Amino acid sequence: MRMVKHLKIGLVEDSHKKQLLTQRITLPPSHTVYDNKTGNAETVMSNYVNTNIVNPLDANRKIPRLIAAPNQNSRQSIF
């Protein structure tokens, strides 16, 4: 099992947007204590951004006016 300890988002060029992403920790689904994802890197990271920042279950965690680009399914698969 891999644990993401550091996340570098290379496609975010604006330093203000990068700072916004550091304001949230990822939370696992309510039915488990871990959130394990497999797939290509973009799909996995897009999932975490979407479920924790763009469209979280808890509306208080949402960062207003932030939208995610469409997933292009790029990069290598991670497990």
Image (spheres, rainbow, N blue to C red):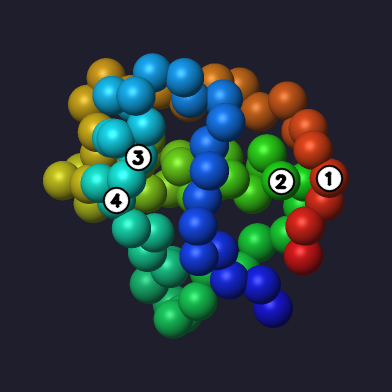
Q: Badge 3 is on which residue?
A: 21
Check disc 3: other Cα within 10 Å, few if <14, some if 14-19, many if 20+: some
Q: Badge 4 is on which residue?
A: 24
Does dot 1 land on a helix, a strand or a loop? loop
- Residue 73 place in picture, x, y as percent: 76, 33
On residue 41, the disc is 2
Q: In front here: 68 or 6?
A: 6
Q: Badge 1 is on which residue?
A: 76
- Residue 28 place in picture, x, y as percent: 43, 68
Do the residues under discs 1 and 2 have CB atoms within 8 angstroms?
Answer: yes
Q: Which of the 4 quarters of the picture holds residue 31?
A: bottom left
Q: Rounded to the nearest whole Å, what is the CA distance between mark 4 and mark 2?
A: 19 Å
Does dot 3 land on a helix, a strand or a loop? helix
* Circle nearer the N terminus (1, 4): 4
Check disc 2: other Cα within 10 Å, few if <14, some if 14-19, many if 20+: some
Do the residues under discs 4 and 2 have CB atoms within 8 angstroms?
Answer: no
